[in-house]
Amino acid sequence: MSDTQWIDAWSIDEGRDRVSRLFQDRFGHAPAGVWSAPGRANLIGEHTDYNGGLVFPFALLHRTFVALTPREDSLVRVVSAQEDTAWEVDLADVAPGSLSGWGTYVVGVAWALREAGYTVHGFDAAVASCVPYGAGLSSSAALEAATAVAVDAVSGLGLAGGVDAPNDEGRRVLVDACIRAENEIAGANTGGMDQAAALRAREGHLLLLDCVTNDVTHVPFALSAAGLELLVIDTRAPHQLVDGQYAQRRATCEAAAVALGVPSLRVIADRGDTMEVIAQALSVPGALVPGVEPQVAVRRVRHVLGDIERVRRVASLLEEGRTAEVGPLLTSAHVSLRDDYEVSCPELDVAVDAACDAGALGARMVGGGFGGSAIALVPHAHVQEIADAVATAFGARGFAAPGFMVAQAGAPAW
């Protein structure tokens, strides 16, 4: 009997029950309602969102649940099943750089909606989640998005729309609020892919997102028809985006774009400049801001351009029904993230190598990097075998036991 650890998603009823009981226990009455939002995995297109590129995420079945009741004043009180301490602040005291801690992801959404001109009061809220924390599966955006649809509902803003008729234009507003919450209040300078996946995804589909126009295309994600599954491997290596490494990569790309005379690296990708031309331009003395090394900038740019092209290639392969051919593109993306973008870690590399050695068609790290999760495209009949091989490889290296899930494209925030 295998002792491989599988990470199960809660049913909607279980999640609602868990968070409702937590709210009742902590606040002494039932909540006005319960809302939820998914974590996300990204099939291909990493660190391209803040470079104006293309990304290909999808919503997971694993969700964060928020039970919430509005208040008449501007006080926000939040408790979480995943945190030992409660969190409390007045919305009048919220400003960039003024707060820290897990509650910033909640209160930041209300602050951003107020900044956008919407009338939002305080609230009491409880949070419970089965999205693995720190796994690179966007637990933070799930929390933001669940808060956003909850606040939207109790404030009567009408932005999210109904379950059967989502308001995509309104959800763009909620996405923007969630991005501002994460960037300006929580202090994590990420792109907008995670929030878009949580709020604008469609069940059973990948979300092809153009990060310049914010237009989306919903692409059917039916791996079972090809006899395949997408295995998610939570390496349990701590994943942090607020330690400066993520921001450093973003700053280097932005400096490279300025040096190349374009608003974002997406322009270079669409224009088709060769890496030789790009390297020459970035090597001109004074082209880059002090502190950015030309050879490092070249590697960062090469990854971004390569992953934008890989997104396009994967989209074409899926449209043509050549799903198995996606595998090698995942592996080439991991090599690029490991070598050119330098955001991998030993646990991620072992997960990718062990999965491929055991029969995966391809694998890569997913998310911002520096820990977190990997994904592997695997034959349906060999899911357990490949998971066992990864777990064995982790044990041989003395790493913590990884967790696994078989990803399916879930529903957006409701």
Image (cartoon, helix red, strand yellow):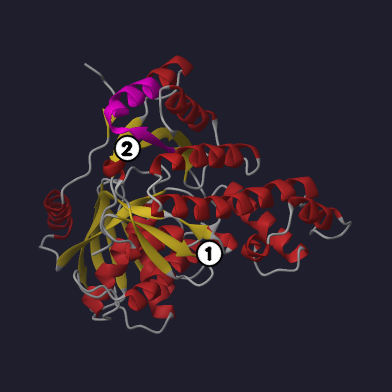
Quarter of the image where the C terminus is located: bottom left
Task: Give the residue type that dot 2 points to.
Answer: Leu
Measure the alpha-carbon separation of dots 1 and 2: 45 Å
Q: Position of residue 46 (x, y in %)?
A: 52, 50
Is residue 190 in view? no
Q: Which residue is mark 2?
A: 228
Which of the marked residues, 1 or 2, is nearer the chain's N terminus?
1
Left or right of 258, for residue 323: left
Q: Main secondary structure of the magenta part?
A: helix
Q: Which residues are magenta?
A: 373-391
Above/below status of 123 relative to 197: below
Left or right of 302, for residue 15: left
What residue lies at 46% left-to-right and 54% top-to-bottom?
Answer: 316
Q: Which mark is residue 97?
A: 1
* Residue lying farthest to the front in this orientation: 320
Task: Give the residue type that dot 1 points to.
Answer: Gly
What residue lies at 74% left-to-right and 51% top-to-bottom?
Answer: 275
